[in-house]
Amino acid sequence: MSEIQQPAAATTEKPKTRIFIADSRDFPDPDPGKTPEEILRLMVDFMPELNNAKIEQTEKDGILYISFLKTVGTKA
């Protein structure tokens, strides 16, 4: 006789709190379902200087801080 295996209990991990930082200002997470890259694209609409920004992430005390760092470029 074969044993009937029970499905593994689903672990529901609470998403981390994310805080976005741009231009030395903190912004709450507008949509936890979106990636940091998607949030950056949303923010470029009202902060065009972030158009070529680099993304850095750090975690402290269970909070994920996502920084959008402006990059210096030249005008064509």
Image (spheres, rainbow, N blue to C red):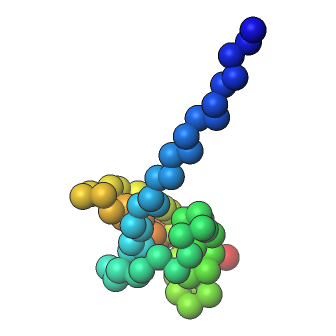
Q: Nearer the viewer, residue 9 or 76?
A: 9
Q: Is residue 8 above or below residue 58?
A: above
- Residue 14 versus residue 16: which sits nearer the camera? 14
Residue 41 appears left or right of 59 = right
- State which quarter of the image contains the N terminus: top right
Q: Is residue 75 visible to us here? A: no
In the image, farthest residue toward the front: 1
Left-right relation of 76 to 32: right
Residue 45 appears anywhere in the view: yes
Q: Quadrant of residue 61?
A: bottom left
Spot the residue most to the left.
Answer: 61
Residue 29: x %, y % from top left: 47, 76
Residue 37 image offset from top left, x and y in percent: 59, 65
Q: Quadrant of residue 8?
A: top right
Query: Taking 1 as reference, is 64 left or right?
Result: left
The residue sitting at 61% across, 80% down in the picture is 42
x 30%, y 58%: residue: 62
Kindly indicate the quadrant of the structure image that contains residue 34. Answer: bottom right
Counting from the top left corner in percent of width and height, residue 70 is at: 46, 72
Instruction: Tell me: residue 44, above or below residue 56.
Output: below
Which quadrant is the C terminus positioned in?
bottom right
Q: Is residue 63 left or right of residue 49?
A: left
Q: Is residue 49 above or below residue 57?
A: below
